[in-house]
Image (tube, grey):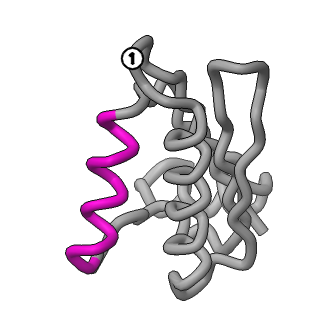
Amino acid sequence: MAYRLFIWERRDNADRAAFGNTALAACKIYRKTDGINSARFYWSGTERIGILLEGTPAALNSPGAGAAPSDAKVAFDMADLARQTDDILLSEAKTGEELYKSAGRA
């Protein structure tokens, strides 16, 4: 399994309830994606949300692929409410080694 963590910081004029509801809507969309086993969001203080995805490396490396218009709406709603400050992909050592070798390295 691999994990992907998105960190979002609320814009000054954004409503906190709308921010939380939009993060929840994004998680619901991620859960429908093949290869994603879990999608949850967490508040980190009053201004920041982390969205944590768990799934296969292939699914986590291509979020948004084949997105429906409703999915795009949620992505733009989230961007209107917050700034994405981090996008961190955490994968197992074996996956990292396979990627390294597939790039023609040792």
**Stretch in magenta:** 68-80
Which quadrant holds residue 99?
A: bottom right
Whether residue 101 sits left or right of residue 72 in the image: it is right
Whether residue 4 sits left or right of residue 86 in the image: it is right
Q: Is residue 5 above or below residue 36?
A: above
Whether residue 106 sits left or right of residue 95 in the image: it is left
Q: What residue sits 51% from the left and 61% below the top?
A: 26
Residue 80: image x %, image y %?
A: 30, 35
For the stretch drawn in magenta, what is the main secondary structure?
helix
Write down the residue under mark 1.
Answer: 13
Q: What residue sits 58% from the left and 73% below the top?
A: 28
Residue 86: image x %, image y %?
A: 53, 28
Q: Is residue 73 above or below residue 66?
A: above
Q: Is residue 69 above or below residue 12?
A: below
Q: What residue sits 33% from the left and 70% below the top?
A: 71
Residue 88: image x %, image y %?
A: 60, 38
Q: Is residue 13 above or below residue 22?
A: above
Q: Please state the total of marks drawn on the protein image.
A: 1
Is 74 covered by the magenta stretch? yes
